[in-house]
Amino acid sequence: MLKIFTKKNIMISLIILFLGAVLYISFGFLPVLKVEGTLVGYAEFQKVNGAIGAFDKISRKSVSPPEEIKKMALESIIESRLLDELILEANPELAKKAEEILQRTLRGNKNLSLDEASKNLYGISAADFQKLVLLPQAKKDALTDYYESNPERLADLWSALLKTAKVKIYYPGFYWENGEIKIK
């Protein structure tokens, strides 16, 4: 009869599990938070956190504490996901309009060296800068244009969305309460 549960087999299994966990974490698959059912991985969080940290270092005389920078990164990611939700509720065509605003902005600034500016200011690539900074701003602009005749409605919708949003933060030291990120 074969012995499956030998010390050697157990050790090999534990090593494989450990290496798998290390790879899972190192490639950023570990979820940091969940917004409206969508998981956000550690890699995306690290990218946003690094960009905010880099910008914070060059834009202030005193650098923000690491916990504050992490909080800002989590807020940025949550805001971006909730903007998508608000656009779906208001008018799904606004997503296309936001993309058009982004492309128009990029075409209108021929002298802008996006690669250089995004590397120097945020420490990220131009593609990441577009995704993490420019596109969320374009979405805000599209929503503002859509609710131009009734900006109070937009403010009310955003406030209601924040209060009812299903957000779960898995990153240690933070939690979501009443539409805000709190530090434990």
Image (cartoon, grey):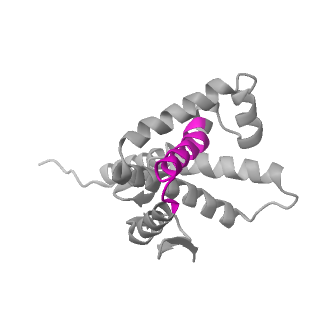
* Identity of the residue furthest to the front in this view: 149
Q: Position of residue 133 (x, y in %)?
A: 61, 43
Task: Specify whether residue 181 is in view.
Answer: yes
Which is nearer the eye, 26 or 115? 115
Q: Position of residue 88 (x, y in %)?
A: 35, 49
Please tell me whether the stretch drawn in magenta is mainly helix, strand or loop.
helix
Q: Quadrant of residue 166?
A: bottom left
The answer to whether one can see residue 39 in this image is: no
Asked whether, in this view, residue 21 is left or right of residue 128, the answer is left
Nearest the camera: 34 or 92? 92
Residue 160 on image: x %, y %: 42, 69
Q: Residue furthest right?
A: 61
Q: Is residue 31 magenta?
A: no
Residue at 46% over, 67% down: 156
165 is higher (above) or lower (below) than 44: below
* Whether residue 32 is situated above or below residue 174 in the rendered picture: above
| Position of residue 86 in the picture relative to residue 137 (left or right) | left
> What x and y, as percent, mark residue 43?
52, 46
Image check: 155 left or right of 6? Answer: right
Identity of the residue drawn at 15% across and 47% down: 2
Specify the quadrant that holds the C terminus. bottom right
Q: Which residues are magenta?
A: 130-151
| Foreground of the two, 53 or 118 | 118
Q: How many marks?
A: 0
> For residue 133: magenta?
yes
